[in-house]
């Protein structure tokens, strides 16, 4: 670079010299030459400065090259260290990866074994539960089949019951069938109340009067030849028709007809005056209403029904109240039976007392015999102890090598037979009653 500058400076000097020579050939170039010389001097000074700058730049370039070499060496060292570190990191990563893989495999294996061990009871339980669920499902299907069969049977029974109910309702609409149904209901109630054992009853007993033949449905016999007349001919046609319609107004009309029919029957039954036809009957008659709901519905529509019946000497009885009446009559019969058998009970008690006295004499004789036996036993033991056993014990002492067993003691019997002492009876009756 220094030689290039020198060449340029030389070329410039030659050019300026040529110009000066050219201008010297001219007559008017004096001034120009002086100016060019001044410029030449300036250019030379500038070239000197540029030379110095070039030298300074060459020093800086040398220093820069040295720094560049140093930096290049450092860079190579850094690159080498980075390469080594990268290799170390890659090796470390591979080692960690291998170690982690090994640890993961071991941990997974152990966890799998532990989980299998822990889940084995759960698996067994689930298997058993699945078996039980299958068994329950089988039973459920069988139960559903059985329930379906029962529902079908119930459906058939319901249809048959509905048919029979309609037949019964149609039958009860006729007076003959309704009367027979009342008689059967009366007999069942009498049997349920136990009246077959304690009292007699008659069905369809007739009696002739001036106004015609009267025929109550049942007569219950009371103690002392008394009688209770029962009538069960209650009209139920209108009441049964209520259940055949859902029209509220028609149901109310039918209920009014049912109440009106009961009113008419009360008047007719009161006019029969059964208490006059049966002298032993009380001054009332029992009207049996075999359907409880018919009585309740009529009483709700006609609250004064009971008072009206009593005014005609009629007692209205439903199955519940009639059972109470029959049970009360049965109790009366049982009390009468006890009163009738009181003499037989007294004779049996007297005979039992006589036999007890004889038995007590025998027991006293046995006690005396036991006492005498114990006394004779004690005397025999005393005689044995005093006269026989001392010689036997002496022989045992002298010949102990030949005798094996010692003679035991014979204690006397201290127990005596207990005397029979009867506690005097405490009477709750007066002496004259006992004598009678």
Image (cartoon, rainbow, N blue to C red):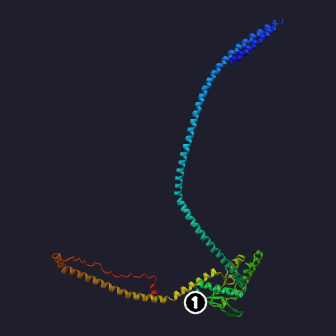
Tell me, yes or no, if residue 112 can be seen here: yes
Q: Is residue 291 left or right of residue 197?
A: right
- Image-quadrant location for residue 405: bottom left
Above or below — where is 238 with respect to 34? Answer: below
Q: Residue at x 28, y 84 (%)?
A: 373
Which of 23/255 is in front? 23
Local secondary structure at mark 1: helix
Q: Is residue 158 left or right of residue 98?
A: right
Q: Residue at x 54, y 50 (%)?
A: 105
**What x and y, as percent, mark residue 222?**
59, 88
**What x and y, as percent, mark residue 198?**
56, 87
Above or below — where is 79 with respect to 114? Answer: above
Which of 215/267 is in front? 215
Q: Residue at x 61, y 24 (%)?
A: 67
Q: Residue at x 44, y 85 (%)?
A: 431
**What x and y, as percent, mark residue 140?**
61, 70
Above or below — where is 294 with respect to 2? Answer: below
**What x and y, as percent, mark residue 277?**
66, 91
- Image-quadrant location for residue 420: bottom left
Quadrant location of the N terminus in the rendered image: top right
Which of 14/163 is in front? 14
State the residue position of label 1: 224
């Amino acid at each position: 670079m220094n030689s290039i500058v020198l060449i340029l400076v030389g070329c410039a000097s030659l050019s300026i010299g040529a110009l000066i020579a050219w201008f010297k050939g001219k007559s008017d170039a004096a001034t120009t030459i002086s100016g060019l010389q001044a410029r030449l001097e300036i250019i030379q000074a500038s070239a000197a400065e540029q030379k110095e700058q070039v030298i300074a730049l060459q020093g800086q370039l040398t220093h820069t090259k040295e720094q560049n070499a140093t930096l290049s060496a450092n860079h190579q060292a850094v690159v080498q260290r980075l390469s080594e570190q990268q290799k170390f990191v890659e090796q470390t990563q591979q080692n960690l990866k291998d170690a982690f893989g090994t640890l993961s495999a071991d941990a997974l294996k152990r966890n799998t074994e532990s989980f299998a061990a822990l889940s084995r009871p759960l698996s067994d339980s689930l298997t058993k539960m699945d078996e039980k669920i299958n068994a329950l499902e089988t039973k459920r299907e069988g139960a559903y089949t059985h329930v379906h069969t029962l529902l079908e049977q119930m459906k058939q029974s319901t249809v048959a019951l509905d048919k029979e109910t309609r037949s019964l309702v149609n039958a009860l609409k006729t007076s003959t069938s309704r009367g027979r149904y009342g008689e059967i209901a009366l007999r069942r109630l009498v049997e349920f109340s136990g009246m077959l054992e304690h009292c007699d009853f008659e069905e369809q007993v007739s009696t002739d009067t001036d106004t015609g033949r009267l025929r109550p449905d049942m007569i219950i016999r009371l103690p002392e030849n008394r009688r209770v007349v029962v009538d069960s001919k209650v009209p139920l046609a209108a009441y049964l028709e209520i259940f055949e319609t859902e029209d509220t107004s028609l149901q109310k009309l039918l209920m009014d007809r049912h109440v009106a029919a009961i009113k008419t029957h009360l008047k007719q039954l009161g006019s029969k005056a059964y208490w006059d036809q049966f002298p032993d009957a009380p001054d009332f008659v029992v009207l049996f209403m075999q359907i409880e709901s018919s009585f309740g519905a009529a009483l709700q529509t006609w609250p004064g029904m009971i008072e009206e019946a009593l005014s005609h000497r009629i007692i209205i009885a439903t199955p519940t109240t009639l059972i109470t009446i029959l049970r009360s009559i049965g109790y009366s019969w049982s009390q009468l039976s006890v009163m009738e058998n009181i003499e037989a009970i007294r004779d049996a008690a007297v005979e039992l007392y006589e036999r007890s006295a004889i038995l007590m004499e025998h027991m006293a004789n046995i006690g005396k015999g036991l006492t005498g036996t114990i006394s004779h036993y004690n005397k025999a033991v005393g005689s044995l102890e005093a006269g026989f056993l001392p010689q036997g014990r002496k022989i045992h002492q002298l010949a102990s090598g030949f005798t094996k067993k010692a003679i035991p003691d014979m204690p006397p019997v201290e127990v005596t037979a207990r005397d029979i002492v009867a506690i005097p009876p405490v009477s709750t009756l007066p002496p004259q009653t006992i004598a009678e």
